[in-house]
Image: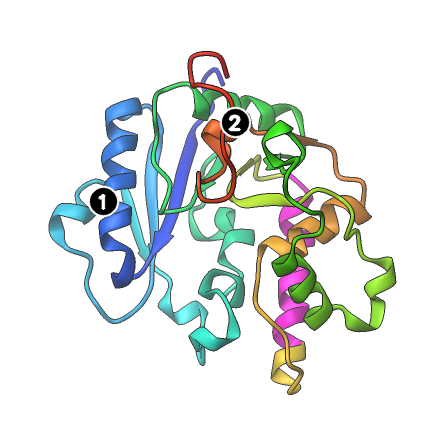
Amino acid sequence: MGAERAVVVTGFNHRHFDLAQDMADSYRAAYGDRYALAAAVYGEVEVPPQLRAKFDLVVDVSDLGPGYDESLGYFFAYSGLKARLPDIFPGFSMYAWIDADCWFQGSESLPRILNGAARHEISIHPEYDIHYTHSPTPGDRTLKIYQQNEARHIDTMPLRMPMVNAGVYAMRPESRVWKMWNAELIQLKLRHDRGEDVYFSDQIPLHKLIYRHGIQFSPSGPSTTGWPSSACRCCTSPRSA
């Protein structure tokens, strides 16, 4: 990474304060002040002081999602936030997003993820390693969202391509993926505003554009650092991964 200034961003509301605390504690234990740590928060409940103190930057993004209701899907997809990190947190030369329900097992994963983003449009983990051979592609949830959002064009969607995990990714601010991803989410919002029944997922539009546009990505790493244990049974240890 050299002299590049990276920021690691997560996001949460009051229902996930405990998860965010665990995530931030594990981050500081692994990396200290090596990279900036930022939080995008939403909702009416103030972030507790002991949690806020773990972050270098805290931005309230509630105003980005007027009219949001949980039945519509995810707030960060509805607001488009995850596709707009350089706008919300300007001034960095590398951006990484880590979901608040993640934690850091050591200091190995972030340098690898950021180095991958330095060489590719995006660093993100696909669901094609050995840990996912027992899971169908597409999964039931993937197929359900695609059918709801892309029913008219379902035959042109990359349903058979491995899912990518939008809960952990990194990009340079100049990556074209930001604008492409944001455009997909804007279209979802416009369709919703016209009365269409759409589901706000940021992962499905990202999966769609990566494969339809042939985006070259760097796999962010083995499943031991990229996916929750509820989604796969890891067959490697952190020492050998």
| Mark drawn on residue 21 | 1
Q: Residue furthest bottom?
A: 195
Is 161 or 117 nearer to us in this picture? Answer: 161
Residue lying at 51% horizontally and 21% vertically, measured from the top left: 112
Question: Within the image, what quadrant is residue 48 found in?
Answer: bottom left
Write down the region rendered in magenta.
Answer: 175-190
Query: Which percent across, then down, holds residue 123?
Result: 59, 33
Q: In the image, 50: left or right of 88? A: left
- Graded by Cα atoms within 10 Å as few (under 14), some (14 to 19) or many (20 or more), the crowding at tag 2 reads many
Furthest residue toward right: 155
Locate residue 188, reporting x and y percent: 65, 70
On screen, residue 37 versus residue 152, left or right, reads: left
Circle 1: element type: helix
Depth check: give the residue in front, 187 or 23. Answer: 23
- Identify the residue at horizontal 12%, vertical 46% (top origin): 50
Identity of the residue furthest to the front in this view: 134
Residue type at numbered disc 1: Gln
Q: Earlier in the sequence, mark 1 or mark 2?
A: 1
Q: Which mark is residue 86?
A: none
Which disc number belongs to residue 113? 2
185 falls in the magenta region: yes
Magenta stretch, overall SS: helix
Crowding around mark 1 (Cα neighbors within 10 Å: few <14, some 14 to 19, many 20+) is some
Say whether residue 140 is visible.
yes
Give the Cα distance between marks 1 and 2.
22 Å
* Residue kind at label 2, given as amino acid type: Ile
- Please name the colour scheme applied to the rendered image: rainbow
Residue occupying the far top of the picture: 240
- Residue 55 shows in this picture: no
Residue shown at 77%/53% (left/top)? 159
Q: In the rendered view, tell whether residue 240 sits above or below residue 206.
A: above
Q: Is residue 184 magenta?
A: yes
